[in-house]
Image: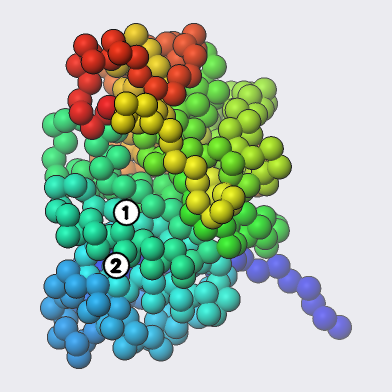
Amino acid sequence: MTNNQNYLAVIKVVGVGGGGVNAVNRMIELGLRGVEFVAINTDAQALLLSDADVKLDVGRELTRGLGAGADPEVGRRAAEDHAEEIEEALAGADMVFVTAGEGGGTGTGGAPVVARIAKAIGALTIGVVTKPFSFEGKRRQSQAERGVDALKNEVDTLIVVPNDRLLEISDRGISIMEAFQTADQVLLAGVQGITDLITTPGLINLDFADVKSVMQGAGSALMGIGSARGADRAIKAAELAVASPLLEASIDGAHGVLLSIQGGSNLGIFEINDAAKLVQEAVHPEANIIFGAVIDDTLGDEVRVTVIAAGFDGGEPHQQQHRDGRRTNFVESASPASTAAVAVATANALAGTNLTAPVLTGAVASGQGNGGSSNASNPDPGTGSQEWAAVADVTTLTQTTEMDHGYDEDDNDLDIPDFLK
């Protein structure tokens, strides 16, 4: 007699190179659960500092453990030389996330090799990478573009987050260390937005099959994050996610969407319906939308929405339309406040990412989270915090203001930083 058993999906997160390993370390620090961590690097000293379950020092003969010297070719050869060890580390995985900071040596050259091995063993393979800040130089940016193109050919789905976009959700006084930590937080959000739909007790294989139906062979993907409080909070959070500064292109035309909504126990069914409807209207009419909701009372009055859109016609999302060479994916207003709303709400969503509350696909789950980063605060809505007051003021504007895809001539008179234009 055959015993039918359900098994938990095996998910492995692989950090490749310095940026990838740093991101993995951040995920471990913040308590991302239900996954196994693998760190791969040519820098033996940096690898020693990782708490990953498996650590692979690749290119030992090639680099003597001293790193790839920002040469992607060295990174590629190092990974290929240790392909058997990488395959052994990935064995048994149903899903593999390959995360890296594009532009360097090991991550740029090694990530496509790791992804190729992951797909060869039958795992759903998802790349989640960052592109370098402009100040890191043209050479690194050029290498990053080539690395993204190479990785795109080896994964089922690729999420790319340009670090320059993080400037739009950061205070001008942010330190360089905090900036790179924010980049790690974005990579965490991308991974968690998918794994939370799978790593919950129950019909895990069904959940995995649903996620796989969206992500397998989907090509490029986009990720948006929004957060709001007060009246119409859910729909405002959804608007902010759809217009997120993290999006390089429009989610219009996406055939597959992972949608996660988080809120307190007072989160209403009509709020969820309105938010989901807004996202549904922004993507392809026949899109396969996988929905998850989290009930977490530590959020208070806040609602967070994460959208991961994939499966675009032609494999690529439609680029945002520009007018006068300016970006067009922000909420319009008579002042820069509404543009700041998208940035502030996205930053708040990242800073307070819930890491422990489970998500049920197509249902509402209940859980308690740790509130994310140990450095992040989750002020009570009644404390009068300036940060949360700013969100409240701006969301009032977005309630009564139409979405506009451009800037008026009067915008030249506004004190808007160049990188926000």
Left or right? Give the position of 240 relative to 55.
Answer: right
Displayed quadrant of residue 74: bottom left
Q: Is residue 108 above or below residue 332?
A: below
**Structural distance between the alpha carbons of marks 2 and 1:** 10 Å
Q: Earlier in the sequence, mark 2 or mark 1?
A: 2
Of residues 345 and 101, which is closer to you in this image?
A: 101
* Tag 2 near tag 1, CB within 8 Å: no
Of residues 353 and 366, which is closer to you in this image?
A: 353
Left or right? Give the position of 81 relative to 158.
Answer: left
One can see residue 74 in this view: yes
Residue beneath disc 1: 130
Residue beneath disc 2: 108
Residue drawn at the location 42% of the way across and 80% of the way down = 89
Of residues 195 and 201, which is closer to you in this image?
A: 195
Displayed quadrant of residue 14: bottom left
| SS at badge 1 | strand
Left or right? Give the position of 227 relative to 122.
Answer: left
